[in-house]
Image (cartoon, grey):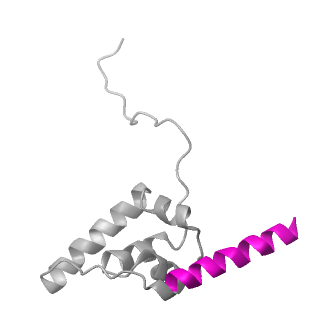
Amino acid sequence: MTDQTNPSPPRRRGRPCKEQPWLKEVAQMVGRGTPLRRALWSRNVLFTERELKNIYRLKKFREYFETAKIEFYWEWGKVPERSHTSPGERLLAARLNASQLADWLRSR
């Protein structure tokens, strides 16, 4: 046993999360008040409802989201107002998801 401390931090278990190239930009847009679906559409990224909910669970997404929210507060002196996706946007998303599923089934 030695008195020296271990210079390297302990290794974490599991596979590290892969960060998508659009994640930081989307999280910053959401932190400034844009709905998640609209922010993803601006980057030409389409997800199902379940995948949209899972994005909020990503640790990196929450980190970027919180920093963008704080920056917005510093800049404007108020918390960004949350806007919601309109019913028309939800209908469009459902139709796009259905067409994606049909295309995927045809390709198999």
Give the answer, above or below, for where 88 lies relative to 68.
below
Residue 84 placement: quadrant: bottom left
Looking at the image, which residue is at 23% across and 80% down? 80
Q: Is residue 102 above or below residue 87?
A: above
The x and y percentages for residue 105 are 82, 67
Q: On the rendered image, what quadrant is the N terminus found in?
A: top left
Relative height, residue 79 to residue 17 (above, below): below
User: Which segment did they paint magenta?
Assistant: 89-108
Question: Can residue 43 be spotted in the picture?
Answer: no
Q: Is residue 5 above or below residue 15?
A: above
- Please tell me whether residue 4 belongs to the stretch shown in magenta: no
Residue 82 location, x and y as percent?
A: 29, 79
Q: Is residue 105 magenta?
A: yes
The residue furthest top is 1
Give the camera-side residue of 74 and 95: 95
Single out the residue that lies furthest toward the left. 77
Query: Where is the C terminus found, in terms of image quarters?
Result: bottom right
**Residue drawn 44% across the image and 77% down it:** 25
Front position in the image: 93 or 1: 93
Q: Main secondary structure of the magenta part?
A: helix
Residue 3, visible in the rendered structure: yes
Q: Quadrant of residue 95?
A: bottom right
Q: Residue at x 31, y 23 (%)?
A: 4
Residue 64 screen position, x and y as percent = 36, 67
Q: Is residue 14 left or right of residue 1?
A: right
